[in-house]
Amino acid sequence: MAIIINIDTSSNFCSVALAIDGEIVVGLESAQKMDHSTSLAPFVEKCFESLRERGEKLDAISVVTGPGSYTGLRIGLSLAKGIAFGQDIPLICVSSLEVMAVRGIFSYHDFQGDEIIIPMMDAGRMEVYTGIYDSALHPVQEESALILEEKSFSDLPDDTKILFIGDGTEKFKELFKKENAVWLGAGMPHAKYMAALSEKYYREKKFSDVAYTVPRYLKEYKATKPKNMILK
């Protein structure tokens, strides 16, 4: 039996889920955008309160490490690393795009098992963070930051359903005209969709180094100054 706290701070909203053997027993999320620094620690504490009531101990901590919000990823990973170090438990790192792919599978009610899943997270203008997964969540194409064009993903087969999910898909609809495309909306990463992945990684002992793990931004972070602070 694996008891795992799952943390996602990669998008606008913070979410945390306590899972036992892949089944969520505590699920929490913030309704406020970019509220990670305020909500995350209390959410995690509620998970620990539940464990104390059950007389159980945590086996691992799982966190989404990117791509996504630069600030959010740092906040989530910092807390997860602190818990892993303090509790002497494994750190599990999960891709936000892989979590979105899981959400896509759960969202498609006609799922047959031979679909291709393409999560897309908006990265500004016509750029997205994306990757390609088969129905078993094996990566078909490496995750990357991609500038969308009409020819993007044109080499994919015509006889297989292609499931697109994420807030970056809306700007691709007009470019991708294949009839086998299925548009699942702006489903973003969420802690409740991490549980199965975290359980799988735990069983496979796919752990990350607490000292050296860093967020996966997929492209260089560029800091900017607020407009009112720019000297004229």
Image: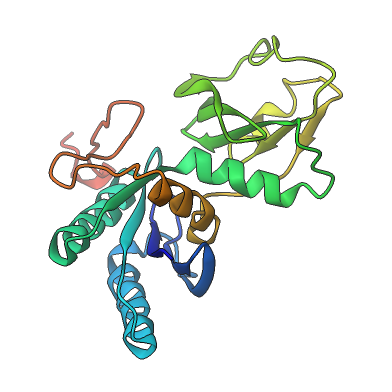
The percent position of residue 61, horizontal first and vertical second, equals: 31, 59
210 left or right of 122?
Answer: left
- Where is the N terminus found, in terms of image quarters? bottom left
* Residue 179 visible in rendering: yes
Q: Nearer the viewer, residue 87 or 226?
A: 87
Q: Above or below — where is 23 with respect to 181?
A: below
- Where is the C terminus found, in terms of image quarters? top left
What is the residue that sits farthest to the bottom in this orientation?
53
The percent position of residue 35, horizontal first and vertical second, equals: 36, 65
Q: Above or below — where is 175 with respect to 13?
A: above
The number of numbered badges drawn on the structure is 0
| Residue shown at 53% from the left, 54% from the top | 196
The percent position of residue 18, horizontal first and vertical second, equals: 43, 70
The percent position of residue 94, horizontal first and vertical second, equals: 40, 44
Tell me the quarter of the picture where residue 78 sits.
bottom left
Q: Above or below — where is 11 with respect to 145?
A: below
32 left or right of 219?
Answer: right
* Residue 186 visible in rendering: no
| Residue shown at 26% from the left, 58% from the top | 80
Query: What color scheme is it?
Result: rainbow
Tell me the quarter of the picture where residue 116 sits.
top right
Q: Nearer the viewer, residue 126 or 194?
A: 194
Q: Nearer the viewer, residue 103 or 21?
A: 21
| Residue shown at 49% from the left, 54% from the top | 194
Q: Above or below — where is 140 with respect to 155?
A: below
